[in-house]
Amino acid sequence: MIDRIIENLYLSDVQDVLNEFRINRLKNELKISHILTVAAESIPVEKQIVGISYTFIYALDTDTQDMFADDLLANALMFIRTSFENNGRILVHCEAGISRSVFVVAAYLMQKLQWSSTKAVEYIQRIRPIALPNDSFMRQLQIFESCHFIADIQIISQCPLYKNWLLNISSASSARFSLHEKLSYSIDSTWSNVEYRCRKCRKILFNDKHIIRHRISTSRNVTDDEETETMDCGFGYFISPMDWMSLNEHRGKISCSCNEKLGHYDWGGRVCEGMTGRPCGTAVRPWIYVNQNKVDRIMKIDQNVSNPIDNIIIRPPKFPCI
């Protein structure tokens, strides 16, 4: 979804820039002239629209990402100002339109309107409710505010608050490479009467206690006095990190030990689109997704049962693989 933050400044996720059914709206309807990508990957040349100016800022949605280093924020703000100076319209996006792009847009509002970090983020959230910069980005916005909205690394590097923050993230950075091991669960650490196996090799992958559920509204035309009815989204399985997964990159595929692709992950998160007829829109972060068509749901009759004949296989309806 594309949201208009102020005149000529828009905010969205990456799908509005990549999806062939949406990109025509950028130039023809919204008259976008500039696109700023704040992400781990730039927009492929073949996906870029002729006549639109693109700029890419490499940034991860992690607690150790320094947005002042290498003048990342300074360059992003300069590109936004350049767009306005040329009477253009700019779209700022990241992967999900939740954290990185919101950080940049909030910084621009702070600099332009002399707003506090809290006021800028809350203003964006009123327009785009899923907006939620990570805690580290919020701290950097506070540093930006205390340094009188200066993003130049040569100047901000002398700021005591920035120096203290660097000391904190340098400690965190040394442990970053083992992050997913610290967060990971073992299939043997918990017991549940429902387990999920790879459909190809039958390996036990996770159980019901590892699933992270979110709910969607099933009510229509609900008034303020009425309660909203909800149900589980049902778009695949979103699960906790497991010790058999390889999650060392910012995003990637999730595969079983038999090399069967099961799903994908993104530490920066994504927006769940739901299913046909049941749209969702929930921001899921981190995004650790397993396709329902790749696993079997096994209902165990008893904890001590070892005979697979005594277990019940429950397969969901077919859903498209993504």
Image (cartoon, grey):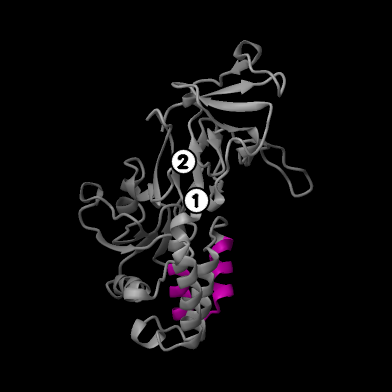
Q: Say which of 263 and 241 sits in front.
A: 241
Identity of the residue drawn at 30% across and 67% down: 88
Q: Quadrant of residue 299?
A: top right
Amino acid type of the residue that numbered disc 2 sits on in the rendered structure:
Met
Q: Which residue is mark 2?
A: 245
Residue at left offset 47%, top offset 55%: 178
Identity of the residue drawn at 64% across and 16% down = 311
Residue 162 visible in image? yes
**Residue type pointed to by label 1:** His
- Percent coordinates x, y for residue 73 in the rendering: 37, 73
At numbered mark 2, what does the secondary structure look like: helix, strand or loop? loop
Location of the C terminus (image quadrant): top left
Q: Which x, y percent locates residue 157?
A: 40, 85
In this rendering, does residue 6 appear at all?
Answer: no
Does the magenta-highlighted stretch encompass residue 115?
Answer: yes
Cα–Cα gap, marks 1 and 2: 9 Å
Q: Is residue 52 left or right of residue 104?
A: left
The residue pinned by badge 1 equals: 180
Q: Nearer the viewer, residue 220 or 73?
A: 73
Identify the secondary structure beneath mark 1: helix
Is the residue marked by circle 1 packed among few (<14), some (14-19), or many (20+) residues within 10 Å?
some
What's drawn in magenta, residue-wise? 104-126
